[in-house]
Image (tube, helix red, strand yellow):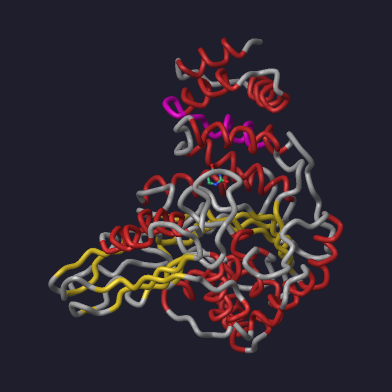
Amino acid sequence: MTAYEIITKKKRNAELSTDEINWITAGYTSGSIPDHQMSALLMAICFSSLSERETVDLTMAMAHSGEMLRPDTGGFNVDKHSTGGVGDKVTLICAPIAAACGVFVPKMSGRGLGHTGGTIDKLGSIAGFRTSLSYDEFIRNVRKAGLAVSGQTENLVPADKKIYALRNVTATVDSIPLICSSIMSKKLACGADGIVLDVKVGDGAFMKDLKSAEDLAELMVRVGKRAGKKCSAVLTNMDKPLGRTVGNSLETIEAIEALKGNSAGDLHEVAVTLAAEMIFTAGERSREECRSMAENAIRSGSALERLQKMIELQGGDPRVTEDSSLFPQAKRRAEIFAPESGYINGISCEETGLISMKLGAGRLAKDLPIDYSAGIVFDKTVGDKVCRGDRLAVLYTSSDCDLESIAEDMKGVFKYSESNDIPKEKNVIKILKGY
Ligand code: URA
């Protein structure tokens, strides 16, 4: 078997055997297969795709490239994954809700990717909060608080770490079987009993149209089921930023407010739907019951208590949940005003993500530090009526970025129409009931 033969086979759209997939994945992870051959294979996969059997094989080969964890929490463990969005602080809301409703949430999370944010970076905005726990401490904390969120352990899915970095620089990210194997290998290696997937659809997501998002969601659910997991997916809208904030401390504050019941609309609906799905995976209650339990956990304050407990156990100051001034405060700000009157009929999501990166909320290059205070607060959203001169948003930063030119770009993010005939987008588009 040679890498050359495997690349040629895939280039000709032939099906690779399980042995070939195992061999090339192990070889690339160990370094015996070079980047240029793996790049050629990834590009061939982008054009020829993979069958479901090949995707399952690749997912398994990647998952087994490192340690396979078995979270010993003494209860039903559920994991949640988002395919990535702008303003997506949902984990910070749905994980404490699910924990308050009796399931365990051992959540290994990533940093921001491209224009999309990551939960680890959001939690990093809490002074003292440790995002890198030993596995023993991680599990101990889950037993005590019902949840813990930590960065991935060093030896978790090394194949994905290498392949993802290569895909990022070879324009091979947007392939459904490659995204599926990347996400599902990490979820399977984390070892939860149930997996709930939030598949984002729209301008700010990797999947721009509903058909591709459905295909990805169905494939991931089938792969999860074949691996013996309870797995379901929720398709949610990413045609506009989720909620009212983008940026790490701003989003963490918004998530805390949502846990206090101070959030309506899109963020509340998406977070409660995902939390209910996480509770549902435990298999003891109907979806309707799970939804009302999730709403109750917000009303009673029990979900917020879980978040406070997690912050405390991970070395952060739990008083941040009562006093938002304890978060890093931006040194500079710029207000954005409506240049015309009318209705806002769109907010470009991808551009918003890129602007928040330029303000310092994301990394423009790997390993650059993050400005936790940076980000955007929206005063107006899609469907709102505005008069010329109304404030639309405020930009925040502590960096020496060119705030004036970023503010100019931000004006272009808003789209207007004269009448309010804007079709109402669904926040939760579809629940794919996977099992
Ligand atoms: N998120 C991942 O973890 N992998 C992908 O390929 C895309 C999004």
- Our reading of the magenta stretch's main secondary structure is helix
Residue 137: % across, % down: 84, 61
Image vertical order of residue 411 relative to residue 226, above or below: below
Q: Does residue 53 belong to the magenta stretch?
A: yes
Q: Which of 373 and 64 is in front in this view?
A: 373
Q: Can residue 435 be seen in this view?
A: no
Image vertical order of residue 176 relative to residue 356, above or below: above
Q: Quadrant of residue 296?
A: bottom right
Figure disc tally: 0
| Quadrant observed for ligand 1 in the rendered image | top right
Residue 277: % across, % down: 58, 66
Q: Which of 248 and 64 is in front in this view?
A: 248
Residue 214: % across, % down: 43, 49
Q: Which of 331 and 271 is in front in this view?
A: 331
Q: Is residue 128 visible?
A: yes
Q: In which quarter of the image is the C terminus?
A: bottom right
Q: Residue at x 37, y 51 (%)?
A: 210
Image vertical order of residue 165 relative to residue 383, above or below: above
Magenta residues, as a range? Answer: 46-60
Please state if 211 lies on the left or on the right of 304 as rendered. Answer: left
Q: Does residue 289 belong to the magenta stretch?
A: no
Image vertical order of residue 68 relative to residue 373, above or below: above
Q: In which quarter of the image is the N terminus?
A: top right
Please state if 51 lies on the left or on the right of 207 as rendered. Answer: right
Residue 357: % across, % down: 46, 55
Q: Which residue is drawn at 68% across and 51% down?
A: 229
